[in-house]
Structures are given as C-alpha cells and as structure tokens.
Amino acid sequence: MIESILYVLVEIGLLRADIIHQRNVLKEEAADGIKRPVKKYFLQPSIKVFLVVMLVVTVPGIFLITRKIGSQADRTVSEMQEISNAIFSWKERHGVYPQNLEALTEGRPLRQQWLSDEWNNQYVYSVDPIKDTCSLLSVGRDGTLGTADDIKN
C-alpha cells in the first residue's frame, strides 16, 4: 500500500515537473521565436529520470556479465587443477594414468561435474602410454578445439 502511494506521488511529481518544463520552453520559444524540439521533448525531467535509471541498471548488468565470463575461465582453471591432482593421485595408487575421466568420477557423485567445464563442454583428456604422460584441456567458451580460448593444464 505504501509503495503504491509513493509510486503515485513520484508520478505526480514527474508530471508536475514536465508541465513546468513545457511551460518554460514555450515561454522561451515565444520570446525569441526559435523552436526547441530537443529541449521540449527529450530533456523533460521524466525522460532524464528514465535515462538515469536505465544507465544505473545497464552499467552494473554489463559489469556483472563481463565479470561472470572471466570467472568462468577462472573456475575452469581451478577445476582442472583439482582434476589433475586426482589424476596424479590415481597414478601414484595404480601405477598408470586413468584411461578416462569417468574412472575418476565412478561412485563419487560430487565429482560428476568434472566431466565438463563451466561452459558445459566436455574436457578433452588423453593418455600417451608410450611417453607415460597425459593431457587435459578445456575447449573454452567457443567449444572448438585448437582456438585461442582453449585452456590447457
């Protein structure tokens, strides 16, 4: 109820300010005979308030979106480090690298997220038994292997 009353009061205040603004612009136009359409319509107090509100809403939104994109890469790097630690622990226990990431997640529901990165792309994991090495990488945001946004561990 109070919100409705405040909303109505704000609307009345903006309408009053718009009417006063219109009168002042009309007086200026009548005094010198020059039309001022931009000042009359675009610079009304209600339009100014609308533009400020839009600015206040969109700028933080853009900031949060760009921050989320950066944090997705950071979370992927952190997760890949956890996976690498688990891979090397597996190697110490079993003497060989796991053949796939599913071997690390079997029977461990909390590790099921290790199968894909923050963009829901499957990790690329491979084992080279001849060199006794393994590699883990994320195809990144674009989901394409071999591009600049790939993350290697």
Image (spheres, rainbow, N blue to C red):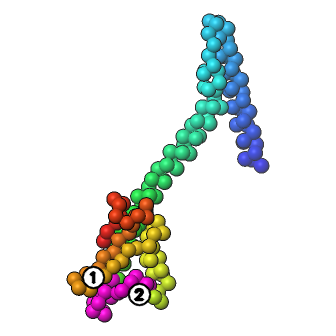
The amino acid marked with disc number 2 is Ala
Residue name at image x 35 percent, y 61 percent? 147
Judging depth in this view, the residue of 89 and 51 nearest the camera is 89
| Residue 131 seen from this side | yes
Judging depth in this view, the residue of 113 and 50 nearest the camera is 113
Identify residue for label 2.
Answer: 103
Quadrant (top left/top right/bottom left/bottom right) for the C terminus: bottom left
Residue name at image x 36 percent, y 77 percent? 125
The amino acid marked with disc number 1 is Asp
| Residue 28 seen from this side | no
| Residue 87 percent coordinates (x, y) | 33, 83
Q: Which residue of the protein is positioned furthest toward the top in this rendering?
A: 32
Q: Earlier in the sequence, mark 1 or mark 2?
A: 2
| Residue 19 percent coordinates (x, y) | 71, 23
Q: Which residue of the protein is positioned furthest toward the right in this rendering?
A: 1
Q: Which residue of the protein is positioned furthest toward the left in this rendering?
A: 131
Residue name at image x 68 percent, y 20 percent? 22
Residue name at image x 33 percent, y 79 percent? 126
Answer above or below: position of 137 versus 148.
below
Q: Main secondary structure of the magenta part?
A: helix
Answer above or below: position of 30 versus 47.
above
Identify residue for label 1.
Answer: 128
| Residue 68 percent coordinates (x, y) | 46, 58
Dot 2: what SS? helix
Q: In the rendered structure, does residue 92 fall within the stretch colored magenta?
A: yes
- Write down the region rendered in magenta: 87-105
